[in-house]
Amino acid sequence: MTELIQQLVDGLGRGGEYALIALGVGLIFGVMRMVNFAHGEMITVSAYASYGLFVVGASWWILVPAIVLTAVLTSVLVEFVAFRWVRSSSDFAMLLTSFGVHFVVQAAFVMFVSASSRHFDRPGWITSTVSLAGIRFEVVDLAIVAATSVSLVFTVWVLQRTVYGMAIRAAAEDFDTARLLGVRPDQVIRVAFALAGLLAGIAAVFVLMRTGRAAPSAGLIPMLKGVLAALIGGLGRLQGAVIGGLLLGLVEILLVSYLPDEIDGMVNGIVFVLVAVLFIFRPSGILSARSSQRP
Amino acid sequence: MKSAGSDRSRRRHPGTFRTVRHKLVCGVGREWIVADLAGAALLFAAVSLLGLGYVAGGDGARESLFTTLLINATVVVGLQVFLGNTGILSFGHVGFGAVAAYAFAILAVDVEWKQRLIGDAPFGLAETSIPPLLAISAAIALTLLVAAVVGLGIVRSGSARGDIAATVITLAVLFAAYEIAINWTDLTGGNRAGISFRPGTAMSGRSYAYAAFALALVVARLYRSSRSGRLARAAREDDLAARALGVNPAGHQMLALLLSVGLVALGACLRVWLTGTVSPERFFIDYTLLTLTMLVVGGRSSVTGAVTGSVVVTVLVEFTRTVAGPEVDTGPFDLVIRPGLTDVCLGLAMLGFMILRPNGLLHDREITDLPLLRRLLRLDRLAEHRHAVAATGPGTAPPQLQASFGSQAGPGSQAGPRSQSGPGSQASLGAGAAPAGAVNDKRLTVVDLCVEFDGLAVLSKAHLSVDRGRICGLIGPNGAGKTTILNVLNGIVPAVSGRVTLGGRVLDGLPSHQRARAGVARTFQNLRLFDDLTVRENVEVVALAHGASRSAARRRAAEMIELNRLTDVAMRRAKDLDYGASKRLEMARAAVSRPSFLLLDEPTAGFTEAESRLIVEQVRIVAERIGCGVVVIDHDLGFITAICDEVYCLDQGSVIARGTAAKIRSDPAVRSAYTGE
């Protein structure tokens, strides 16, 4: 029982990270109808930014806001440089554009820094645990659960209460109609990317605290998990992204704990196959979006 | 149109002699096979000459680079078969390649050497070894088996709801193959070592690479012009419209996947055999990037594009290697493990093409589309000749069209007399189009139809009954449920309750494409053409979907194109048409399937009154020619009055009036629905 609760919290911690990334993927899908395979690059770039700051002796108090800021800037910049130009292209072109962005960023770090990863110190408390009611929790998991909750509340507030948020939601429902009603596409898309960058930045903080590592492909796996989570929940449904993320985190933790050791390294592959099987039965995710589209 | 018919009958005579002579003269009876084989041969010759010239002036490194190019081109052409024809983005083909590569290496490495690498391999694999060619065949067979299983998932999620679910399934293939290769060390040798051949037993010479490349070219070209390839491309352009017009994409996507994976597997085996080694990284994201870039740079919709892209990107990669300098040089074989610059350039190439030229250098043009080559190969004359033979040959003549004018007896007893207010209204549409006796059971009926969206009733107990040969109008204010009835009729929207029958056959529960084949065709209010296909292809592909042979499809398409005044733009892409021509193409495309019932969704929307009058004539002519019934939605009451035998008025999901147009116009309930009085 105790073990199960520990695993649940562990899973929620991991799932929280995925949820933050998935929410960004969902936001961008909402305004652009594009699944962003470059969504992990925010994490990669902020990893190198924090490595650079670490080298000159900055503490985590500086690193955390720097990571978040870098992620936001990267997100907006990528939109400006690449995605702006394929806005009305086919799905195929948009997917490959984001795939291309992913590669250019990754290869640029290989070229200009190194193919091998750079390490920096993780904060001292990262491995410490606290006991609550006889159950030991990792502090970082609790921190993630707390930060995720706050971020989600913030996102909901932005989406529900601010003009930009309403514009994003309207655009996610029906972009063309929103445009006809005066929503400015450039602005909505930029705000969506900034918000997605912010959420990815918060996720990046925890990813980097856990790993203490900057590598050219640092963003790949978190991005894939975020995309999977968004798809599991049903693209275009923001609450679905959160549910998908948490579910994915839980399933992973359970797989890690209960799979035999020999195939421990195959968790990612197994998760992929499970999701693929899910798609065979529910191609549009668990919370299927309404299909009342007018042909 | 009448003159076309009489022309045909004048020319009708036994076609056997002509066919025989034609085959003697041309050797091959089908111009598309000539074009495909010639196209493959030309590409093969061009690449070979280029390569031989390059190799002649250099050393062994050039030799192996050229062989690598041939193998990569085989893989890229394989990718083209699936990505180009179905439009589904796949990251998984390299994963399938990994399966084939490992299967090949495990089977083909000699026993003694294998004992040192993977002595603990399960299933007794460590003790057996088979000759390389046999091993390649076995590896391809195994990979096809895997692909068939995965393919079930891909075609199920298919392109119907956006490609993304299918794309993620392919990603799963890539990652699963990679992780199995890393973790199942007994079988695969794990991450670092992988499996390598005993030095000196790797492939030597280029003959296998040549053979594989040639095979890939022929398969890709033949598939491209095959019925399956063309139907897959229709679904690529618009899945929903393709289904509504009778195409069931699943089988075609599966066939494309299997052919494609087969070629990729062949290329992967040769890649392993050539380099003498396989490891997880060699068939993972880097190789995916390389091959996808090759495909999209050249143009994914054409085989020539795939080959061009392979050559161009190979040159680019070699150039970046030279620029990057000798210190990063790790030997001649590997194009893809080079760090940094090469990947940046590949990524930028992919990005640049997706942004500036998403269709690649060649879009869907093939080498045989060059006017000079067409003339040299006499492709056009072959086509004409073939066409003529087909048109006059026995058994290929179209069914007699007996759309008779003024035939006695309106088929439905409940149908009122035609309104006499429209031009040409005395020419009542004949009921004799179908074989006598079958006429009266060709009735389309809708009974007690209820449809809900999110609990909101859109249709409640709507009903409709149309006989073949009659034209029935559906009017009503916006949101009355008119288009929804059409959507239910052809299976796009499910009904909560109610029944749809066609000639006594219950259609409820049938998927779109089966309804289309049962005889219900439609047009779309907001144009859902196959944008990237030409006008002729748009029409032909629907005829193909309804079982016409390729020459019959061409002839039927030509007839419909002429009937709908599209002859001048027949070779233009649908997306380049003006609005009027697009609307006419919608009609031609639906009509070419010779449906029993043609459903038209707002054919006059966006037209002036004078243009609407032309459409009255067009609808009549088309309906007469194919002898079908018509259900037409429109807001233009003048149009409706001019064309319809009977009119239904819908309001808030129910039929509030039915009868002749004149009667409907004076109906108080209709007036209040329209004006809110």
Image: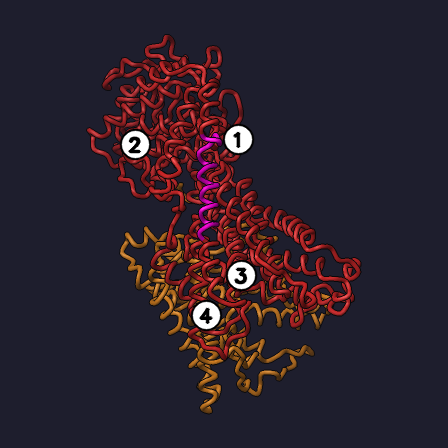
Q: Earlier in the sequence, mark 3 or mark 4?
A: 3
Q: Chain of mark 2?
A: B
Q: Which residue is mark 1?
A: B508
Mark 2 or mark 3: name the one nearer the start of the chain: 3
User: Is residue B453 at least partly visible in the picture?
Assistant: no
Mark 1 belongs to which amino acid? Asp
Number of numbered discs on residues: 4
Residue B505 percent across, percent down from the top left = 53, 23
Marks 2 and 1 in Cβ contact (< 8 Å): no
Q: Amino acid at mark 3?
A: Thr
User: B538 or B449: nearer the eye?
Assistant: B538
| Marks 4 and 1 on same chain | yes
Spatial CA distance of label 2 from label 3 is 47 Å
- Magenta-drawn segment: B26-46
State whether residue A124 is above or below residue B396. below
Rounded to the nearest angstrom, the CA distance separating label 3 from label 1 is: 55 Å
Q: Is residue A221 left or right of residue B523?
A: right
Q: Residue B646, position in %: x, y?
A: 34, 20
Amino acid type assigned to the residue bearing label 4 in the image: Thr
Q: Closer to the camera: disc 4 or disc 2?
A: 4
CA gap, disc 4 and disc 2: 48 Å
Q: Quadrant of residue B350?
A: bottom left
* Marks 3 and 1, the one that precedes in the sequence: 3
Q: CA distance from mark 4 to mark 1?
A: 56 Å
- Chain B display color: red
Residues at marks 3 and 4, CA–CA distance in whole angstroms: 16 Å
Q: List the residue tagged with mark 3.
A: B68
